[in-house]
Image: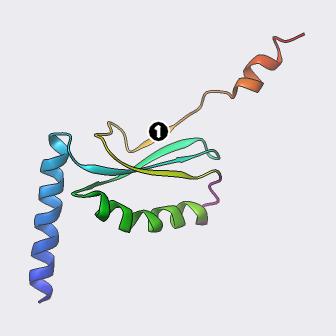
Amino acid sequence: MKDHETAQSGFSQWLAGLVNDVGLAWWIEIKTESPRCTYYFGPFLSPAEAEAEKVGYIQDLQQENAKGIVCEVKRCKPKELTIYDESPSVGRSLSGQLR
């Protein structure tokens, strides 16, 4: 039974990769305020499969002390899996210019 599950998992991963190649896969997009990042987890074959997995990713980020977590399951094809937003916030960038 274990070999069957492993083969099924391998096939599912292959199929998810194929679906992702044509831009039809589902991904979990998680944005955090601190650190200011966007994370992508996937690909998944269905939104239900992604929904079932997102709790674990959110818990991992919470354990790493991420703050302001916003999660969305969506169909996309991310170019990067982790995007760090290093731009200064509006308040900081304007503070020296306001008089």
* Magenta-colored stretch includes residue 66: yes
Quarter of the image for the N terminus: give it.
Answer: bottom left
* Side of 35 where 53 appears, left or right: left
Quadrant in which residue 88 is drawn: top right
> Is residue 32 toward the left or the right of residue 47 in the image?
right
Expressed as whole percent of the image width and height from the top left, the position of residue 9 reads 17, 71
Q: Position of residue 67 (x, y in %)?
A: 65, 53
Residue at far right of view: 99
Tell me the SS state at disc 1: strand
Residue depicted at 59% across the width and 63% down the height: 62
Magenta-highlighted residues: 63-67
Residue 14: quadrant of the picture: bottom left
Q: Quadrant of the C terminus?
A: top right
Please rate how many residues cluster around mark 1, counting C-alpha atoms within 10 Å: few if below 14, some from 14 to 19, many from 20. Answer: few
Q: In the image as oriented, which residue stretches furthest toward the front?
A: 48
Report the side of 51 relative to 23 (left or right): right
Q: How is the image coloured?
A: rainbow
Indicate whether residue 5 is drawn in magenta: no
Q: Residue at x 69, y 28 (%)?
A: 89
**Splitting the image into 4 quarters, where does residue 85 fall?**
top right
Residue 61 lies, with reference to residue 85, above or below; the image says: below
Which residue sits furthest bottom? 1
Locate residue 69, reporting x and y percent: 58, 52
- Residue under label 1, please give it: 83
Count of numbered labels shown in the rendering: 1
At x 29% / y 64%, what residue is drawn? 49
At label 1, the amino acid type is Ile
Considering only vertical position in the picture, is 79 above or below 14?
A: above
Q: Main secondary structure of the magenta part?
A: loop
